[in-house]
Structure formats: structure tokens, C-alpha cells
Amino acid sequence: MLTLSFFAAGLALCAVLAYRRCRARTWLAALAVCVAVAWWLSASLPLLATGAVFLAVAGALFHPGPLRRACVSASLLSRFRRALPQLSSSEREALEAGTVWWDGELLSGNPDWRRLAAMPAARLSAEEQAFVDGPVEALCEMLDEWRITHELHDLPPEAWQHIKRHGLLGMIIPKAYGGLGFSAVAHSQVILKLTSRSGTAAVSVMVPNSLGPAELLLNYGTQAQKDYYLPRLARGDEIPCFALTSPHAGSDAGSIPDYGIVCRGEWQGEHGVLGIRLTWEKRYITLGPIATLLGLAFRLYDPDRLIGPRYDVGITLALISASLPGVNIGRRHRAMDAAFMTGPNWGKDVFVPFSSVIGGIERAGQGWAMLMNCLAAGRSISLPANSCGAAKMCVLTAGAYSRVRRQFGLPLGRFEGIEAVLARIAGNTYVMEAARETTAVALDGGEKPAVISSIVKYHLTERVRKVVNDAMDIHAGKAICTGPGNYLALAYQQVPIAITVEGANILTRSMIIFGQGVVRGHPYLLREIAAGAGHHGARAVRDFDEALFGHLAFFAGNAMKTLWLGFTRARWLAMPGDGITCAYYAQLTRFSAVLAFVSDVVLAVLGGALKRRERLSARLADVLSLLYLGTCVLKRYDDQGRQSDDVPLVRWAMADTLCRIEQALRVVFDNFRPAWVGRLLGGMVFPLRAREFHAPSDDMDAEVSRAILQPGPVRERLTRGVFLSRSATDPVATLEAALEAVVVSESVEARLRSAAPAGAAYRPDDERPVQAALEAGLITPEEADAVKRAAQLRREVIMVDDFPQDLSPMHACRTTQAVSFEQLEPEDRTIR
């Protein structure tokens, strides 16, 4: 019995030591104490002998000395090298791109919440706020997206002049070069506001401030290149584009067929100039049709070894003037119904000197690494801001329309089916805005989070697709009748554009987020790979030894933590936050340990085959992504002063997040092969078997939906940053006016319904009962005017645009006055 008790106590002690990730010395000291206690308790000789042998073996294994390295690590390193999959140069450069930020914390099994709390909240400087309220507001006021997309097929000339004059093309360029030198938060806020007014303007402004010549010059250009190009880009003297995608190389950009040959040629009258003769064909190039300066990606070859020993130098980036002989700008593509400029370009045997290579001859062949390091801007700023701008407009318009539009005598928003849809719109927008702000702040802090940028690009563009679809469903017939008064249809049509740019979403989810994240964010895996793929000898064994045994302790700790927090459901973790969020921090910590543990098991079982298990990788990517989005929700709540009005949104967002995490993990376990490993993982992660987390309840949906059905602080915070026109004829301004009028008139209309004769239905658009109630003294003249105004504005909101039979966009209008069938001309009767 003593032996059994001692054995159980030893196992419990090991579990505690593993859970707390104790160092080797602590383990050895604890085991030595166990042997001493057994001797003191006069344990049996076999038990003492077993303990002594175990202590000796543990000492040899845990102590990082020459014995362990010689007997264990050297042999394991040889096997690891044989099993290590070969990485292409482009894969290795992608893995090494950017920085590891909060993704590393989420894969650590024990996120440091103090680090997150120390990050500042998203704030604009006084200068940046004045710019958003001034030039950006003025630009939005002069834009009419219907006219842009259906008549002009471009921004109006005065808008382009305004954009250039106020430096919107040079927001990321420092002031020393004539740019605005704005923060990532300000850059994001500008794109958000423009998107809420005109997708065409947003794309036209965001591309020069995203992945392109300016970003690449700032990071890698020579001083001469910066001095010449950056002021011209900031003033709009040069319109840039970045030519990456080829017809035969889209997401697989590493296989670019476009090429350049190192040679000598003539340049500006001088012969024998060392340069490159370029041949390329590109498509889908935004701003390409009007670009004066092409940032070009191509593979560089040096057959005569003029610049070094390599024939295949690698992917290289250069700046090419669109006016050079041999450069061809093709006709425009038409991206859905969007009017931003996009199109193909190509060139054949175009000679440029090496001074055209970004960074000069020293940067030749480094283009892929340069691209990967700079990609965070487009993925982390522009596309999330674009998505949030569209989502916020859906919150604004769907909430208002659901209150203004009535069916069966009730506002749409009072129906439970609509409540669920409104809650999804508001809840998803809250999550998206939290991720946008948190990521922008990280960029301003010097981070270039490659994995996080993929997460926000994928999830925000996917969520805005759902938000816009939900808003379309609520508006129903009004949303499908396009015209100047339709504020949703263009966003609906243009959503797929963001889904495809900066990397197709399917591949981002299935191949990049987890595949890159688990290697970069893991505290030991990259060190093991570096030791296995790098130098040989004693140093390699020592590096591998440290990484391997650190990894084993890390794995054991996460395994124990996963099991313990699964049994206790993370109830006793000491976490930050208030009474609302403390439990959510605990669950995110729990699932961080789960993800770290499951990732190690997946890597151990599948190894390099994980690259081909894309669906498994995608589901684990969802877990990592949802952990990040949940983190952002809690940070936003804290940053905004823990507003009690926002608690329903936080509860909805976290219920949705945790439910999705559990679903993704259970699907991973159900589909894992070999199946027994999946069952073992499922038993450790969810030892109580029962489903733990559920989608937002009906009560949550109702509470969230009510918050956006009326003007108030929640709706104001959730839609902050969108553009609202001051024009009385603007459809969104009309909708907002209608919402305010309906809120004011509802109590009066309720009295009118109560006063209606038995069996008579009250109609808000019928002025006769209003006049009768006024004459009877039931309502005041002011109340009568409020009801009439609400009825008039409600009708204006409900009406849709109509056109002549040839659907000429130049003659669209909205009939707002009530028209009887008898008043119509004979030819119109057959149409309607």
C-alpha cells in the first residue's frame, strides 16, 4: 500500500512540475526529495532501488551536459535531419518574414496578458483627426459612387485633384520627403471612412499606401531612390502600381515566369551600361491603367555572371517608368461593378539600368523576402479598414431600416428572425473593429506581424461578406433594386474583390495561417529546424539539445495544463479583467495551451505531411485566428473604459468565438488519422465529453439587436468613423433622419392606434386619423407634425430607384409620392 501511495504521489508531483514548466534543477531536486522521503519512511528495497535508478537516469537526461548531448541529442539530431522536409527558398523566406507578435503568445500556452494591456489604445493625433475631419470629409462629400461606377467609370477629375493636393497618396511617406507621415491607425481610419462612401476612392487611395513602390522604397530603397521617387509619389506626380500577378503565377508567386537578363545596353545615350533586359506579362494590376511608375516583380538571371556567381539570381523588384519604349499598358479589367482602375501590362526586351532595382544591385535576388516583409501593410491595414468601413455602414443602415420599415404593424427589428440577423451584423462588426484597431496599434509599435496580417485579412474580409449578405437580406427588395438610392448593392457586388486580393482567402486559411504560424510562433520549433538544417558539429548538437529538451518540457507542461483546465473548465485561473471578462481571459488561456499541445502532437504524428493536410491545417488556423479575435475583443472593451452598454456585444462576441473554437477542435479530432490519436486528443481536451460552449443565445441576440435599432452610445461607438453626408438628398442621410423621426413619433402613433375604431387598421401613411386626433385634442400640433414627418421620411426610405425602359443610368429617379393606378399613363400601366 505504501508503495502504491508513494507511486501515486510521485505521479502527482511530476504532473505539478510539468504543469508549472519547472526547470531541470527543480525536477532533480524534487526527485531527490522523493527518494529521501522513501528512505526515511523505510520503504521497501525494490522501491528505493527503483527511485535511485530513476533519479540517476533523470539526472543524465535533465542535466544539459556533455553526457546527454553525446548519448541522446546527437543520435536524435541525425534522425531529425533525415526526417526534416526540404524547404524551397521562397518557403524559407516566407517563414522568416515579418515579426512574431501576439501569435507567439497564443502559441505559448500561457499568454502574457500584461503585455497586451501595456499596448496603447487606438488614438489619432490632433493633426490626424483634423485631416480625417477636413480633407477626407471634403473628399467624401464630393463623391457619388453610383455616378462613379455607372457613368464616369472613374473618380471625377476634381476628386483626383483633391486626392493629390492633400497628399492622400502619400500617407505612409515621411514628412521629410513631402508625405503626411501618418500612423497606421490614421491610415486605417482614412481608408475606413472612404470605404463607407466610395469603394472606388478607397481602393484608389489605399493601393499607393499599401504594398507598392513607396512601402518598398522606405524599407529597402537606396538614398538616391528615396530622394527622387518619394517626393514625387507624395505629390501625386507619379501614380504607382505594383505588378506581381502573372497569368500563370497567382498565389504561387514564387513561380513567376516574368524574367530579366543581366546584360549591358544603352541607357540615355550611354553605351555599355550594366542593366537588365526585361520581359513580363501581368494582370489584375490595380491602378495599372493610369500608373506612371510600375513596381515590377520578376526572376533575374545572369548567364554571363556579370554580377556574381549565380545563374538564377532570384526574384527581384524594380521600378519601371510606364513611358519607356517596350512597356505596354493594356485595356482595363472590370472588377465586378467597381470603377477603380485595374488592368494588364506587359513588356518585351525593356532595358533598364541596375539603378532601377529597388535597393540597387545589392538587393538583386532578395525580392521575395522584401515582398513578404512588406505585405503586412496591405493585409493589416488596408483590407481590414476596407472591410470595417463596409460593415459599419451595414450596422448603420440595417439597424435604421429595421426600425423604420414596418410589417404587420411592427418594425422589422421587433421580429425574432430579424433580431438574429441584426445581432450577427453588430456582433461581427464589433469583432472586426476590435481586430482592426489592435493590429494597427501593433504596427505603430514597430511590429510586422506576418501571421496576424494573414488572420485579419482572411477573417475580416470573410466576415464582411456575411455582414453585407445579412444586411441585404433585411433590406430585401430595396437592396436588389440598384440605383443612386441603393447604399448596399455596390458593397455586395464588390465584397469578392477584397476576398481575392493579397492572396486568395482559401489558400490563406488552409496553407498560410497555421503552417507559418506554428513554425514562427512556436518557442522551440524554428530553433530545432535551424539546428537541423544549419551547421554541423558540436555547436549544432548543443543548439539542438537545448531546443529539443526545452520543447519536451514545453510539451509536457501544455499536456498537463490541457488536461487540468479541461477537467476544471479553467474556473480557478487567476486572470485579469473585470467580472464580465475574467472568465473569458481564462478560457483563452486554456485554449492557448490546448492549441500548443495539439500542434505539437500534429507535428509529431504528421511531420512534413502536414503541408498536404490542408483541411486539418485550416481548422487549426481557425483556432489560432479565433484566439486572436477574442483577444482583440477583450482589449477593445478594456480600451474603451469597459462601457456597460457594450457588455452585450462583448458577451455575444465571446460566446460566438468560444463556440467556434470548440467546434473547430472537435472536427479536428473527429477527422484525425490515425483515429486513435484523435480520440486521445479529444479525451484530453474535453475530458468531460459534454459540449461546453454554445452559440449566442436568443436573449443575447435580442439585447444586441436592440442596441442598433435606435440612436445611442452603442450604435455611435460601433459606427464611429463612417461618413454621413450633410446633403438632404443623400439616401443614408435620409435614412438617419427617418430613424430619428420614427423614434420621436412612435409613442404618438401608439396612442393613435389605441384610439382607432374597433376593427379599423391604423396606417402611418394616412393623414386622416392624424388630423382627426388633432382636432379632437388627442395630440398636439407638434406631435401631429412629427407623425407626418415620420410618415413622409419612411416612404422616402422605402422607395427604390426606377429607370426608363432602356435602363439608362442617366435618368434614374425615386418616386416618393403616392400614385394611384388611375393616375398612370396607359403605357406605364403595362410596365408596372
Image (cartoon, rainbow, N blue to C red):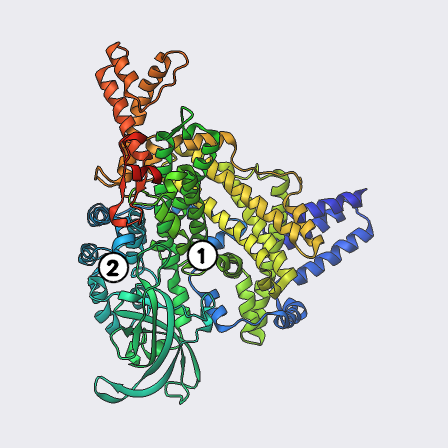
Residue most extreme to the top: 776
Residue drawn at x 45%, y 39% is 424
Q: Amino acid at mark 1?
A: Ser
Q: Amino acid at mark 2?
A: Leu
- Could you tell me residue 262's position as x and y percent? 36, 84
Residue 454, which numbered label?
Answer: 1
Instruction: Give the image quarter of residue 736.
Output: top left
Dot 2 lies on which element? helix
- Name the one closer to the observer, 539 or 690: 690
- Could you tell me residue 313's position as x and y percent? 42, 80
For residue 782, side relative to residue 578 (left or right): left
- Name the one closer to the observer, 531 or 566: 566
Residue 400 visible within the image: yes
Dot 1 lies on which element? helix
For residue 481, side relative to residue 249 (left or right): left
In the displayed structure, 532 sits above or below 186; it is below
Say which residue label 2 marks: 169
